[in-house]
Image (cartoon, grey):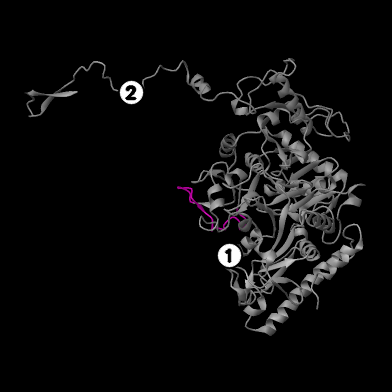
């Protein structure tokens, strides 16, 4: 366009003329119009078809090895999983979201050849046999976001891109409602009785609860099915199937288990273990062995787990961990509730510790590769992560303290029970309005220095973490093998009780093998395996106190994280193997005389206490608590002979 200065309008402005410019047409992103004639046709062009979430396929095709044949086998496998044990006709299963189905679904009847032997038959039929149950199979995070936001109240996208959701009335695990079927095999094998996490139920009661869960799932219009793996060790990988009613649960397990490739999914076949998560539906409280409307039941013989009456996703994660604590030791593989990282030279360290001891913080190290944050196996050829993701606590999370976790909370991450600003959707991690147990579940590859695949060589260092609020354990102690076993079996930390009339008292907490809630055998079995592997590989045991110094909680002060990190660095580098040591009273711990970057006076806790008599009293008190806790283990032989047992007992407090 140009101005013609020779002509003027009556208002004094120059007249604007359009110039015809040859071959100088302004680019306007011109394109041929779409071929669609209707909006529906246009929308159909937006998304291209792909596996594994395929549309309905004509399952009558019989071409051997065809896509249809693979889908038919897959649906028959899922149908067998969802088959009732007391109905002659199972649900009609079809693949895909019912909201997207435009044609009459092709039917896949439930297979009567269920993978288990015990199948009573009754000639009755329910309405669920007359309807379609749509299987939403291994959906992607984006698809699960859509499902959750459309169908599950309380699901929102936060400002970071994570999916915020609610777990209902239960915001943590329900250990008192967890049951394990006691049969001829497990009655002899498992740890039962005082101190054990295994509360018994019989086979019949399990089947009643299974029937209730399966009937509920089959009554729904759609259910979510995840086929995934446990254990990065290719020789000991397990196939798991999770059937759930909520998109949130499906996304959680997508993150926490190992995600199969499309090729692995095609040849997945029958799972090794199946979870039926009907947590939105309660159990019948009048059923034998039930103590509430919640029940989490494991049947090792049937290779199944049933969840009723709780929507807390952590029950699935820890249920599978309990399974691994049973299956792996039977293969002479040690299952461990620990963090694990590896240095650039291939030196691996295990980190054991209960909540609040710093296990996640100390195992996440920018200078080392993260193999995993919580669950591992130690086999004859090294360590492997059981999971495909991390489940981090979010309370008081900050970018400064935990940058890796902060940055991992993005699209694909599940945020449980957090509170956020309603307009901007920014999460307030200090807000405990729903629960203090706020959590984030994300794939391990969201951590920048994660080692993929999550495997490593044999550990060089076994680090036991304790937050000692009594303030009498040294910041670091080198342990001999018997001492390592003693403190591993004890699983000590101290929690700070609430304020009562201005007095704050530390409370000793013991959890065998640093994971008593999940172990299946007696703790001494795991201890014997750990002792054997440490001895064979020449690993060194360490006890780290991340708690108080200079007095108990309320009078002393917490050991600085910077000092603890220097101690951990000295362990990794091998510096502490060559240090000079002094033995302490009562616990008989070997403490180094000096560590580069750490004040020498704090290494022996007696030096930091102004009142030496008070220190001695507190030390004896804690020693007594250790002894009392260990009484339950004194009658169990550890290993192949009684020598190790006697050495471990002698490694405890002596006064």
Residue 572: name its quadrant: bottom right
**Mark 2 neighbour class, 10 Å CA radius: few under 14, some 14 to 19, many 20 or more:** few
Answer with left or right where residue 331 lies relative to residue 581.
right
Q: Is residue 195 above or below residue 262?
A: below
Q: Is residue 429 magenta?
A: yes
Which class describes the residues within 10 Å of circle 1: few (<14), some (14-19), or many (20+)? some
What is the quadrant of the C terminus in the image?
bottom right
Q: Which mark is residue 601?
A: none
| Picture quadrant where residue 362 is located | bottom right
> Where does residue 40 sit, x and y in percent of width and height?
51, 21
Which residue is tagged 1?
561
* SS state under label 1: helix
Characterize the magenta stretch by its predominant secondary structure.
Answer: loop
Give the quadrant of the N terminus.
Answer: top left
| Residue 345, horizontal then vertical, whole percent | 64, 51
Task: State how many labels appear.
Answer: 2
What segment carries the magenta color? 421-438
* Mark 1 → mark 2, Cα distance in angstroms: 59 Å
Q: Earlier in the sequence, mark 1 or mark 2?
A: 2
In the image, 247 versus 185, the foreground residue is 185
Q: Nearer the viewer, mark 1 or mark 2?
A: 1
Percent from the top left, x then y, of residue 295? 76, 49
Looking at the image, residue 570 lies above or below residue 377:
below
Residue 443 in view (yes/no)? no
| Residue drawn at x 79%, y 37% as measured from the top left | 272
Say if the magenta span includes residue 597.
no
Figure quadrant of residue 17: top left
Residue picked out by circle 2: 28
Task: Decide which of 229, 196 is in the foreground and name it.
Answer: 229
**x and y percentages locating residue 66 in the rendered image:** 71, 18
Residue depicted at 88% across the width and 31% down the height: 121
């Amino acid at each position: 366009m140009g101005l013609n200065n020779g002509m003027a309008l009556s208002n004094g402005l120059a007249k604007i003329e359009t110039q015809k410019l040859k071959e100088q047409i302004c680019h306007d992103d011109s394109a041929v119009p779409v071929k669609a004639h209707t909006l529906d046709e246009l929308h159909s062009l937006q998304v291209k078809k792909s596996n594994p979430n395929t549309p309905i396929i004509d399952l009558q095709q019989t071409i051997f090895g065809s896509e249809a044949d693979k889908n038919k086998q897959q649906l028959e496998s899922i149908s067998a999983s969802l088959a009732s044990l007391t109905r002659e006709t199972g649900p009609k299963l079809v693949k895909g979201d019912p909201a997207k189905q435009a044609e009459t679904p092709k039917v896949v009847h439930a297979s009567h050849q269920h993978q288990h032997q015990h199948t009573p038959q009754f000639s009755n039929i329910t309405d669920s046999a007359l309807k379609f149950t749509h299987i939403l199979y291994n959906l992607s995070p984006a698809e699960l976001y859509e499902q959750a936001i459309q169908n599950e109240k309380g699901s929102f996208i936060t400002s970071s891109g994570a999916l915020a959701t609610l777990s209902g009335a239960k915001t943590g695990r329900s250990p008192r409602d967890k049951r394990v079927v006691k049969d001829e095999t497990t009655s002899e094998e498992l740890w039962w009785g005082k101190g054990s996490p295994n509360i018994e139920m019989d086979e019949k009661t399990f089947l009643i609860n299974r029937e209730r869960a399966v009937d509920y799932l089959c009554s729904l219009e759609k259910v979510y099915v995840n086929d995934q793996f446990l254990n990065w060790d290719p020789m000991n990988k397990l196939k798991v199937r999770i059937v759930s009613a909520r998109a949130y649960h499906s996304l959680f397990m997508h993150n926490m288990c190992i995600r199969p490739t499309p090729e692995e999914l095609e040849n997945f076949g029958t799972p090794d273990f199946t979870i039926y998560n009907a947590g939105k539906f309660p159990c019948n409280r009048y059923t034998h062995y039930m103590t509430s409307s919640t029940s989490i039941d494991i049947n090792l013989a049937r290779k199944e787990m049933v969840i009723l009456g709780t929507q807390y996703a952590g029950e699935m994660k820890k249920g599978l961990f309990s399974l691994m604590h049973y299956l792996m030791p039977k293969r002479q593989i040690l299952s461990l509730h620990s963090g694990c990282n590896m240095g650039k030279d291939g030196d691996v360290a295990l980190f054991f510790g209960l909540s609040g001891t710093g296990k996640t913080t100390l195992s996440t190290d920018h200078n080392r590769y993260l193999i995993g944050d919580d669950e591992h196996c130690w086999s004859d050829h090294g360590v492997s992560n059981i999971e495909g993701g991390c489940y981090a606590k979010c309370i008081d999370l900050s970018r400064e303290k935990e940058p890796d976790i902060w940055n991992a909370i993005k699209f694909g991450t599940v945020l449980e029970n957090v509170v956020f600003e309603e307009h901007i959707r920014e999460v307030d991690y200090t807000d405990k309005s729903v629960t203090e147990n706020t959590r984030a579940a994300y794939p391990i590859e969201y951590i920048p220095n994660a080692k993929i695949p999550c495997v490593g060589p044999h550990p060089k260092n076994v680090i036991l973490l304790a937050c000692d609020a009594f303030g009498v354990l040294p910041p670091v102690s080198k342990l001999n093998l018997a001492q390592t076993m003693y403190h591993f079996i004890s699983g000590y930390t101290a929690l700070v009780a609430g304020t009562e009339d201005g007095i704050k008292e530390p409370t000793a907490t013991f959890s065998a093998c640093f994971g008593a809630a999940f172990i299946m055998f007696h703790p001494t079995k795991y201890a014997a395996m750990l002792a054997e592997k440490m001895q064979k590989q020449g690993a060194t045991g360490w006890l780290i106190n991340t708690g108080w110094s200079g007095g108990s909680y309320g009078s002393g002060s917490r050991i600085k994280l910077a000092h603890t990190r220097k101690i951990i660095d000295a362990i990794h580098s091998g510096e502490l193997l060559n240090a000079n040591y002094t033995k302490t009273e009562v616990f008989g711990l070997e403490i180094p005389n000096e560590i580069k970057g750490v004040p020498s006076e704090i290494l022996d806790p007696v030096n930091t206490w102004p009142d030496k008599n008070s220190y001695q009293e507190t030390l004896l008190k804690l020693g007594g608590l250790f002894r009392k806790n260990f009484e339950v283990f004194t009658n169990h032989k550890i290993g192949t002979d009684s020598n190790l047992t006697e050495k471990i007992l002698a490694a405890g407090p002596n006064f």
